[in-house]
Amino acid sequence: MRRYRPWKIWLSRLLIALVCGFSIYFATDIGTGSNIITTAIFAQSNTETASNASAPLAKLPAISPAEAANPPVIKDSVKKSTPDANPLGMNNLVPFPSNVALPMRVGVALFVNNISKINEATNTFESQFDIRYVWKDPRLAFDTGEMGTNRLEFGQETAVAKLATIWNPQIKITNIIEKDAQIVPGLFIHYDGKVELIQRVKATFESKLTLDAFPFDTQSLLVAMLSSKYNSNQIALSQDQEDLNESGLDQDLKVNGWKPQGITFKMTQIRAWNGAFLRQIEARVGMKRIPNAILGSIFTPFLLTLIVPTILTFFSNSELGPRLVAWSGSILALVALTFTFSVRYPWLGSNSLVSQIFTTGHAYQLISVLLSITLLNPDIARRMDRFIVAELVRYLRWIVPVGFLGVLITKSLLTAFDW
């Protein structure tokens, strides 16, 4: 039997230990190195993000006339970091002008380019319009000879940057739904310090709709503008003839199912939480509904549910059984029609014209059923004076149906013409 020497055994064990040690060392070194690289990249990413996020818009340099005429190309990464918000909502640190008469006048004009949708269920409407704000800051006056122009122009990104370096009234649209809102600014600074800010706004707006007169209703779509930072002693939102001339509706404005009526403005004043009064201007776009299609969908099925039992009851010698069967079917049909309209128009209240018409129809059905089982019932009529019954039936045959139609027409006309 072959024997191994003790030194060979210890040598083999030592070699195995050295190999295991080197393996563990290299594995640890590789893992540590990967962790260090990952941490460095993560820290670098956070540093870039923090620097971009913390760079205040107010520190952007002022734009020269040459840069305004040929705006620099902005990289996609910078565009993505620019917030899509109202430029007037920026809280810059430029102080209020000190050499102007108070309250400073801020002219407001609004021109509606398009109204794409009016949603009665959510009390909203979608629109695109141009808002023009005008104020005068003597600090921005410049020499036309030195500048070579009497007006400086800034558009989009350059307008946002320039707004961060000058004072602005920070006017906001209070009823705008900021989600998916698009606001594109343009800025003009005149040689005498006059500032014109034009914003093209495309968004959804909240506006309370009054639907009691549906489908003869006229809605007033609201756009409310307010500066919550400056009170009525500092700025005054107002309109002169120039602002009124710049306001209006596009002559080609068309909204499906609606007819534009014009635009009106109203100055209001609200009280802030600190007791100060804030000046607010409300622009309202009048829209009158075109009721033709809706009237057909309401009155046609409504009258069809009543015409057959009316003929059987008042203008034929049918027995009591067929009359009651006809009115039972009419009642079920009108209930189904009422339910259908409540699902189709869930925003209609109990005071609406449609609800009143359906209620009048149910009342007419009740009266007709009571007449069918009393005066128009031969068994009951035999127990009464036949001359009196005959005279009553002769009058009721025309008074009930014609009176019912008269009530419907009167309600509709009073609602349509707002008498």
Image (cartoon, grey):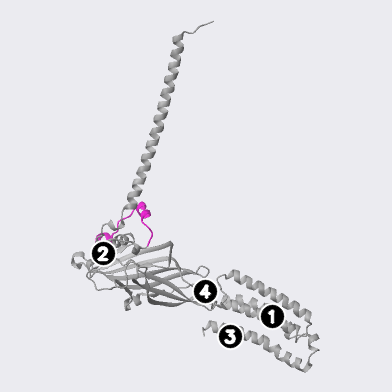
- Within 10 angstroms of label 3, few (less than 14), some, or many (20 or more) residues? few
Label for residue 413? none
Q: Give the range drawn in magenta.
A: 65-85
The residue singled out by tag 3 in the image is 410
Work out whether mark 1 precedes mark 4 in sequence or the reverse, and give the earlier one.
Answer: 4
Work out whether mark 3 precedes mark 4 in sequence or the reverse, and give the earlier one.
Answer: 4
Label for residue 95? 2
Whether 403 is drawn above or below 95: the answer is: below
The residue singled out by tag 4 in the image is 257
At 61% from the left edge and 79% from the top edge, which residue is drawn?
A: 357
Which residue is at the far bottom?
A: 387
Work out whether mark 2 precedes mark 1 in sequence or the reverse, and give the earlier one.
Answer: 2
SS type, badge 4:
loop
Q: Where does residue 322 sit, x and y in percent of width and height? A: 77, 79
User: Is residue 1 shown left or right of residue 15?
Assistant: right
Cα separation, mark 2 vs mark 4, equals 48 Å
